[in-house]
Structures are given as C-alpha cells and as structure tokens.
Image (cartoon, rainbow, N blue to C red):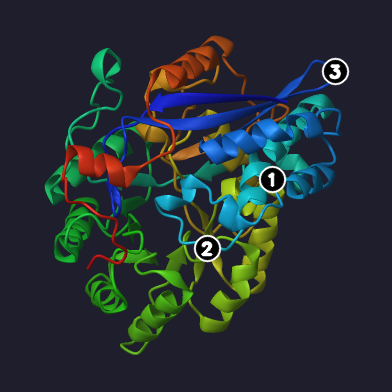
Amino acid sequence: MIVTPVALADPPLRNAVGIHEPYANRLIVELVGENGQSGFGEAAYSSTTHADLRRLRPEIAGRDAANQSALYRVVAGLLDATPETRFDPILRNFDATSEGANTAPPRTFSPIEVAALDLTGRSLGVPVAELLGGRVRDAVPFSAYLFYKHAGGGGEGDDAREDIYGEALTADDVVVQARQMIDGYGFRSIKLKAGVFPPGEEIVTIQTLRSAFGTGVPLRIDPNCAWTVETSVRVGRELANELEYFEDPTPDIAGMAAVRRGLLAEGIALPNATNMCVTAFDQIPDAVREDAVQVILGDHHYWGGLRATVELGRICSTFGIGMSMHSNSHLGVSLMAMVHVAAAIPNLTYDVDTHYPWLHEADEIISGGKIKFENGAVKVPTTPGLGVEIDRDALARGHELFERIPYRDRDDVGYMRNTIDPTWEKLLPRW
C-alpha cells in the first residue's frame, strides 16, 4: 500500500463559507498485488486522513484485495479512538456532521476499497461496475456545476493556470460560464453553488439561467445551509417552477423537514436534496420519519466506498427517495470511481455532480489527459478495473507540487479572510 499526497490548482470559487484556496490536495492510494498489478483510489486530503492511511499500511499489506469486508474491519479496528480526540479538519468547512460522530472509518476506508476493487477487477479481467453487481447503464450523465467566481485559474506565482472561465460575480457572468461549460462538455442540466450573495441576487441568477436555457434544462441550487428555514421557504416559493430539487437550503434534518412542511403547506412539492444533513446510514431513519429529504446525494468518499454507495441506492429505492451524487474538487481516479458506482445503481434518478471541468489539464494524473465527456456523460469502461491508467510522471509532479506549496488542510474561511474580507466568519445560516 502506497499513499501519495498530490496537489492540483484550484480556481477561486466562492461558496457559503468562503473561497477555494489556490490549490486543492488529494490522496492517492495504490495497492500493489503479488501479481504485479496495481489498483488506485483517491480521497480528499486532510492531515488526519493522511496520517491514518500511513498508520494502516502495515495492517493492509498482505491482505486479500477481493475481501473488502475484511479490509473494512482492519480500518475500523484501528480507527477506534474517541471522535473528540481525532476530529478531522476536513469537516471544518462544510460537513454538518456532529463532532461527536466518528466519520474516520468510512472516509479512510473509501480510497482503500476503490483501490482494492480496481486491483481485483484488473486481476480478474472485469470492470469494477461488474464487481458491484453489474452495470444498468452504459454512460453516466453529469451536471454542469456553476460557481460564483473571482478572476483567476488557480495556482499562484509562476505556477498560475490560465483563467479559462473568467470572473463570474453577476447573473449574466454565470450564464456565460454555463454556456462555456455546456459547449465544452455537453451537459444537459445545471447546478448553481449558492449561499454567496443575498438570496434575492441568487434567485435572479436562477431566473436568468432559465431564460437563457429554456424549460428543457433542469436547474438546481445549493446554498450549503446558508439560509434559515424562513428564507428557504421564501426562496423555494420564488423558484418552485424553476428547480428540479432544492439542495441543502438550511442546516440539519429538523430544518430541512421544516422547509418541506412550509412549502407543502403552500402546495409546493419541491423535493429537498442533501449531501450535508444525511451523510451516514444511521441518519436515514430520522430523515425518513421527518420527510426531511426526498433526494440523497451519495458520495463514496464519505459513505464508505463503492459497495456502501450501491447499498445506499437500495435503501433510497426502498423508501422512495431519489438519488444523485455529490462532488468535490477531484482527479480522474475519483471521477471513474463515480462512473462505475453510478453505472451499478438502478435508481440513480438525477444527473451526477462533478467538479471535473474545473480541473486544469496540467494537473490530471490519468494517462492520456483528462477524461472525455460526450453529451454531458462519461462512458462506463469495459476494460478491467476502473479502466484508466496512472501517468507515473504526472503523479510524481503532483506530489512534488504538494511538497512545494504551503497549503495543507483546506481552509475556505481563512483564505476568504486573507484575500477578500478580513472580517469574514463562517456563519451557517447567514441569511
């Protein structure tokens, strides 16, 4: 087991808690089989996750990659410290999970499991999707992921990247960004990251997108819990005819349930979606009981891997909950893992999120460069494992960049304070 931290340039994208730093860090896990084959997984970087993965190396070495249940027991057995002593800094930006919940085992296991499935698939000569129960679709559709954005393409100094999309701080700017992204990738639906400006401005942005792209393009808005229940109900009322779902307008299950009740009382059955208030299996019963969410955005990075995400799909189907997928800044390993698990979930009812268009070509570690989209979708590989190869030179460059930069644990709040507003504080909800 080899753990390699890498850095990639990240544009100055805005969100409810601040702004992206010039670089995002990822962790690449490689499992080398006794047959000489390698399998790869990817995770968001945090100093805690990095340390945990390094601690796990001697425990994982020598295990059977095809027995992922045994691998999980190894991970969970080692990461049994009390959550209060091991709070992961990755949670400080957005994750609404209680600090009393130990999320380390599923988060740390995920890249190991993906690498194990990749290695097993390569060794058996079958794609990962077949190891997850078999594909139900041959291509996975994704959504254009729009951001309010300051000027800059990511990186800094001599390592600054070209600003492909330009500044986008107005509704008209966001429409231009959407056209660029749709022209380049063929996306058929649009998601706006909101919670940046007062809600009235973001309502106008959605309305402007609707005017620009017509009624045939589904729209979503995600303010990352920036609004109170009352504000959420007001925005939901204003955008009831524009949105396919309403993602995390307000914090926690109780808040989401209150938004649902408030809108239903006005005859508005706009589905609530979440990747913040339901992020683990033990949160599903309360969410169902309260009718808090009608769509769950699964993410194998923190639900505990690909097999767990397939299981999530079955549970969603049981309770009539729709399903899509959450994304964060990522490389091609994570994208292909998403493609394989999405291919194996029958009730994937919405286009999947991805930050991939924001990744600069120079930072990809996949051989052959960035993965291609056709009509907004990625074809599910028919080749063994994840279906991609790692460019060893690109991986080495990513690691060298990681060693060179000062950024480690992601801090959207601190970077916002240092570059845009010295008085900035994280405040959820803000409006």
Q: Residue at x 76, y 48 (%)?
A: 133
Question: The N terminus is located in which quarter?
Answer: top right
Which quadrant does the C terminus fall into? bottom left
Task: Give the image quarter of residue 258.
Answer: bottom left
The amino acid at mark 3 is Asn
Circle 3: element type = loop
For marks 1 and 2, the one nearer the N-term is 1
The residue singled out by tag 2 in the image is 296
Q: Where residue 112 sits in the image (x, y, percent)? A: 69, 36
| Disc 1: which residue | 135
Q: Nearer the viewer, residue 222 or 268?
A: 222
Q: Give the alpha-carbon distance from disc 3 to disc 2, as whole Å.
A: 39 Å
Q: Secondary structure at mark 1?
A: loop
Q: Which amino acid, mark 2?
A: Ile
Given residues 189 and 32, the one toward you in this image is 32
Q: Nearer the viewer, mark 1 or mark 2?
A: 2
Q: Residues within 10 Å of mark 2 (few under 14, many from 20)?
A: many
User: Which residue: 57% across, 82% down?
Assistant: 289
Residue 35, numbered label: 3
Classify residue 146 by image quadrant: top left
Residues under numbered marks 3 and 2 in contact, where contact means CB atoms less than 8 Å apart: no
